[in-house]
Image (tube, rainbow, N blue to C red):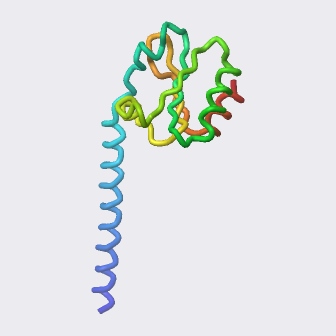
Amino acid sequence: MFLARGTVVIVVLFAVAFAGRLYRAWRSGLQADRPAHPLVPASLLAGAARTWVVFTSPYCATCGPVADRLQLSDPSARVVKVDATREPHLAGAFSVRSAPTVLLADAAGNVTARLVGAEAVEAYVAAR
């Protein structure tokens, strides 16, 4: 009886460890398959050396202040607001799930920074 219980416990432990290993392998595969961000469209860049793209929504209370804060902290950069509800394809291309989501793009349209939330923007600005 005792030997049977011990065997069951060992089998369950191995099954749990194996399932955990399979889950971690599956999860890392998902992250590896995630494509890099596409280029920011030239229409948003308008020839600027640096462009802040602020994805907003109609009910976002912090989006306006975030855009203003970025403009004050980086006056030589262009700041563009994009309503994610009106531009769902663009928001989807950059995996925008909440507002504000902010991207910093270089002159070629490469995303050099991605910040999600007003706190992340404030921390980024404070660190500069």
Query: In this rendering, is residue 122 above or below 73?
Result: below
Q: The N terminus is located in which quarter?
A: bottom left
Instruction: Specify the farthest residue to the bottom.
Output: 1
Q: Residue at x 29, y 79 (%)?
A: 7
96 relative to 11 in the view: left or right: right
Q: Nearer the viewer, residue 52 or 62?
A: 62
Q: Is residue 105 above or below residue 18?
A: above
Considering the image in quadrants, where does the C terminus appear?
A: top right
Q: Position of residue 26 (x, y in %)?
A: 30, 49
Q: Left or right: where does residue 81 sit relative to residue 108? A: right
Count of picture labels: 0
Residue 127 in the image: state x and y as whole percent. Answer: 69, 28
In the foreground, 127 or 64: 64
x 52%, y 34%: residue: 56
Q: Give the residue furthest to the top.
A: 47
Q: Residue at x 66, y 32 (%)?
A: 65
Horizontal and vertical percent position of residue 33: 30, 36
Q: Residue at x 34, y 66 (%)?
A: 16
Q: Quadrant of residue 43?
A: top left
Residue 105 coordinates in the image, percent (x, y): 50, 19
Looking at the picture, tell me which residue is in the foreground, 95 or 25: 95
Vertical position of residue 105 compared to residue 63: above or below: above
